[in-house]
Image (cartoon, rainbow, N blue to C red):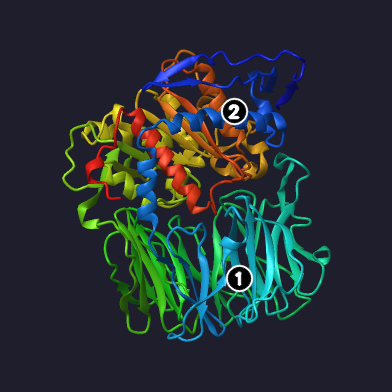
Amino acid sequence: MKKILLITMIGVFMVSCNNSESKKNNIKLKYPITKKVDTVTNYFGTEVKDAYRWLEDDMSEETANWVKDQNEVTFDYLSNIPYREELKNRLEKLWNYEKIGSPFKEGDYTYFYKNNGLQNQYVLYRYKNENDEPEVFLDPNSFSEDGTTSLGGLSFSKDGSILAYAISEGGSDWRKIIIMDAASKEIKEDTIIDVKFSGMAWKGNEGIFYSSYEKPKGSELSAKTDQHRLFYHKLGTSQKSDKVLFGENEKRRYVGGSVTEDEKYLIITASTSTSGNELYFKDLSNPKSEIKPIILGFDYDTYVLDHKNGEFLLVTNVDAPNKRIVKVSVKNPDSKNWVNVIPETKNVLSPSKASGFIFTNYMVDAVSKVMQYDYNGKLVREIELPGVGSAGGFGGKKDAETIYYSFSNYITPGSIYSFKPATGVSAVYKKPAIDFNSEDFESKQVFYTSKDGTKVPMIISYKKGTELNGKNPTILYAYGGFNISLTPSFSISNAVWMEQGGIFAVPNLRGGGEYGKEWHKAGTKLQKQNVFDDFIAAAEYLIDNKYTSSNHLAIRGGSNGGLLVGATMTQRPDLMKVALPAVGVMDMLRYHTFTAGAGWAYDYGTAEDSKEMFEYLKGYSPVHNVKEGVEYPATMVTTGDHDDRVVPAHSFKFAAELQDKQTGDNPTLIRIETNAGHGAGTPVSKTIEQYADIFGFTLYNMGYKELPSKAKIKG
């Protein structure tokens, strides 16, 4: 097994050999000096150097100074891009329209989220009667002066009289839970602190269930993330007396608690990774009842959709890679007693429930198809959607007469529709008034062939009339992991990109969930290279079919998608002009030693598993595959200085390696958002600045001295 040979702080600090001036489009760059330390780790007899391990301490003054120095270089470079401000102005103008979420009923009130346009955070409003003027109920913009404290989720008691809501500070995954009286909006008791990766589920009006880890002391890297525990907090008592219901003796990385709508059962999910879970339940009507299993083991994903008349409705991929819905008696829930209600189909299932019906949202080549069933599995109707794209919602309470769903695609701004399950009547509820004409743009789905012959879908969106001459600025964006599906959705930032004559292309790579469990598994562990090959093949398709060329292609992705960009640019640096890895997992030998990283082992494997797994990970790990003498594409790494999910050390080390070894004039920058995390809850103002910088950097390094469609930009 691995041995750590740590020979640091011995006074032999080497400096980066690439601190000389370089030029790109007349902008001079002089990178900060990044010291090197003699740190070596032995993996199965192979010694691996880790010269920048000191950057893993994101709490040290030395790292803070490095961040400051890097940002000075980066923002000095960005400030010299002549149309950066024009991009920011256009983003602001297009962003500035009223956005309203689907309404939902809690107690005597109807609630909905709204953003007036450029508010940093959405505001929660409510009204009692349709004709009432909505009042502000909860305004996250008031949580902090700089807008970096955001709403991290909320949960009402069943009668709507009490609210539990979570806040996130500085983008952190750690949360605080605040209990509020819904009628008076008064805070009821002390704040519950140190909560992470948690829902909030009510037991009547008595208390809530929530989950968390032991809070780290000092750096986030010291956090213990192998023991997630489910707590019960009784209102009016101290958090110190909160009872651990699950996880005290069973070590699980992720534990969640929810309560069935009829409030009869507590449902517990428990897992050791991001894929596969155990499922348990507890009878809440009997204080002495034991927690009982529904399914054990971590090979499958199963959850409770509902409980009715002594039976659980379960959604599962047991014997159904694309998922099915089954029912089983609460008295004997063993899987051998499961009875199909809605069998598996060739398309991946994502169901919801409302008004006594089941709504099955199927992905057909990453596009939504929605059916309505009764609880016996009888088809009621297929729901006619407004177009080809992504539909979400269709959830609600059993007594809801009207429910709501959203619809969008890459060129259609999201609209809210009402739907009456009893009659099947659908109508527009809210359509945004946005300064973007969808009729001027088009999206098309193509299928291309990856390296091993696998057919992969990709949706390409652009302005109508675009000439396929190989010169169009193009962003290729993907994810490819953790069973996550990229379905068509509208983005204000991508709309601005397309206004410039840019092409936006999204392939559905293996590792995602678009075609079920097997599609996911085909991009994990020793098959992870399939994901990179799919991405490379997507780029080659765009080039071969004259959508773009290597000189006009940028690749982009975040988190696992940041890994995708890092691996692709180090394997094929000739393929693209610009690389934009965001909050990426870049050190594949050590990712599992940071915060929640160990939970990602189902997808990645770890360097400690076996010599074969170590060598495979080292073979594509971005940090370990930056080579001397290679001209890498113009690169802007982006991260948050206190990201506690994918720690910034990944990005720090990757940027340091690139700056040390890059050959040629292409810039290698890192843009580090301070007082920021993994991305959730980022204030709108910061998001606009980020995209202005990303698009400006991309176009500038493709050789554009002015915006490609400057004459056609409004505002």
Q: Which residue is mark 2?
A: 69
> Taking 242 as reference, is 669 left or right?
left
**Residue 459: percent from left, percent from top:** 29, 47
Amino acid type for the residue under numbered disc 1: Ser
Residue 87, placed above or below residue 383: above
Seen at 41% across and 15% down, the residue is 664
Distance from disc 1 to disc 2, alpha carbons, whole Å, reads: 43 Å
**Residue 581: percent from left, percent from top:** 47, 35
Seen at 46% across and 44% down, the residue is 689
Amino acid type for the residue under numbered disc 2: Asp
Q: How many marks?
A: 2
Residue 654, placed above or below residue 557: above
Q: Nearer the viewer, residue 535 or 402?
A: 402
Q: Nearer the viewer, residue 10 or 3?
A: 10
In what element is the residue under mark 1? strand
> Taking 106 as reference, is 414 left or right?
left
Whether residue 645 is visible: yes
- CB under 8 Å between callouts 1 and 2? no
**Residue 686: percent from left, percent from top:** 50, 47
Please report whichever mark, 1 or 2, sits nearer to the chain's N-terminal start. 2
| Picture quadrant where residue 430 is located | bottom left
| Image quadrant occupied by the N terminus | top right
In what element is the residue under mark 2? helix
Seen at 40% across and 73% down, the residue is 404
Whether residue 616 is visible: no
Badge 2 crowding class, 10 Å Cα cut-off, few under 14, some 14 to 19, many 20 or more, is: some
Q: Nearer the viewer, residue 481 or 711?
A: 711
| Picture quadrant where residue 697 is located | top left
Seen at 41% across and 18% down, the residue is 23
Q: Which residue is mark 1?
A: 155
